[in-house]
Amino acid sequence: MRAMVMDRVGGPLEVREVPDPVPPAGGVVVRVHATGLCRSDWHAWAGHEDVVLPHVPGHELAGVVSAVGTGVARWSAGDRVTVPFTCGCGRCGWCLSGNAQVCPDQQQPGFTYWGSFAQYVALPAADVNLVRIPAEVSFEAAAALGCRFATAYRALAGRARLASGEWLTVIGAGGVGLSVVMIARALGASVIAVDRNPEALEAASALGASHTLASDGTDSSDVASRVHEITDGGSHVAVDALGSEGACTDSIMSLRRHGRHVQIGLQPPALGNPRLPMARVIAWELDLLGTHGMAAVDYPPMLALIQGGILRPQQLIGRVISLDEAASLLPRFDRARLAGMTMIDPRRP
Ligand SMILES: [Zn+2]
Ligand SMILES: [Zn+2]
């Protein structure tokens, strides 16, 4: 098959022929129809995550089952499927209690083994991890769910328990930030979106953000005081959808008393642990919440909102490109000013 191969950290990415994957016991192989390019792929390329070289990135995917391993009960060739980027082992107490997203033995395509920037990808523990794509949901929209959209959904609905009528502030209006905007509006919240990229802020407005704030991430842009003014005392929920010390601090400082901060953006230990305003966390009794993808068992309520047309992840897709185009884009993905999500179709020549 053709795949995008990373031979060294921070080096050029090459699309070339590699051996086809075979389905593991309990797992399947999927022919990839759509796979999203995400900031996490850039982190792995830049050496902020441990990957075994040579490596194939790609963790947000949708496609069609092409081969089925031994012991798989629920899936057969031809099924349209997607998968959370956190694939549980299917056997431990966390997986059995519906929390595969924090499974200690989880696998992540594109991080712990070869991922979906390829024509085919193997997926483990299919009966626990695979999600059937409803007929009315496209492969591109389904691929958007696996990492950023599902993570945003769980962050707001599952972790922060965002309620109708509350204020939500999101720092960073990239793929996951725009997902946060869309889901927060669907849950009845009012949204303030913060980003340095005017196109990203326009996209956030189009998706229903009532206020947008331009910020270059420095103290002088003073995001928190502007949010406090708009919301008359601070946001009920705030999200760092970027992953930096500054974004996390802006999120925490934007909150009102008893507010809830959710950390979605990665803060790789290789970049150093962030210094955070813990005095404010203590004095205002703020909640700091982590979130890590979403288990397959939690997909049905989100899929119901998509089938009902209330959530439209397809609106987040800015462009669809080939593997070759993606290979040249990924190394500059942290600097590329792209509004919306970038999808790869590995079937394109
Ligand atoms: Zn991702
Ligand atoms: Zn497990």
Image (cartoon, grey):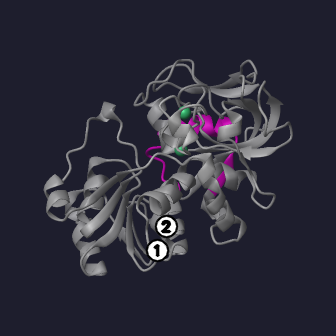
Residue 277 part of the magenta segment? no
Residue 99: mark: none
**Quadrant of the image occupied by residue 86:** top right
Res 299 → quadrant: bottom right
In the image: residue 258, left or right of residue 10: left
Q: Residues within 10 Å of mark 1 (few under 14, many from 20)?
A: many
Query: Would residue 81 be found to the left or right of residue 264 on screen?
Result: right
Q: Is residue 348 left or right of residue 266?
A: right
Q: Which residue is mark 1?
A: 209
Could you tell me if the residues under marks 1 and 2 are in contact, i.e. CB atoms within 8 Å? yes
Give the x, y percent position of residue 326: 62, 39
Residue positioned 36% across, 48% down in the render:
243
Element at label 2? helix
- Residue 331 in the magenta stretch? The answer is yes
Which labelled disc corresponds to residue 181?
2
Observer-nearest of 297 and 325: 297
Q: Residue at x 76, y 35 (%)?
A: 30
Amino acid type, callout 1: Ala
Q: Is residue 268 above or below residue 220?
A: above
Query: Number of numbered discs present?
Result: 2
Q: Earlier in the sequence, mark 1 or mark 2?
A: 2
Q: Which residues are magenta?
A: 318-338
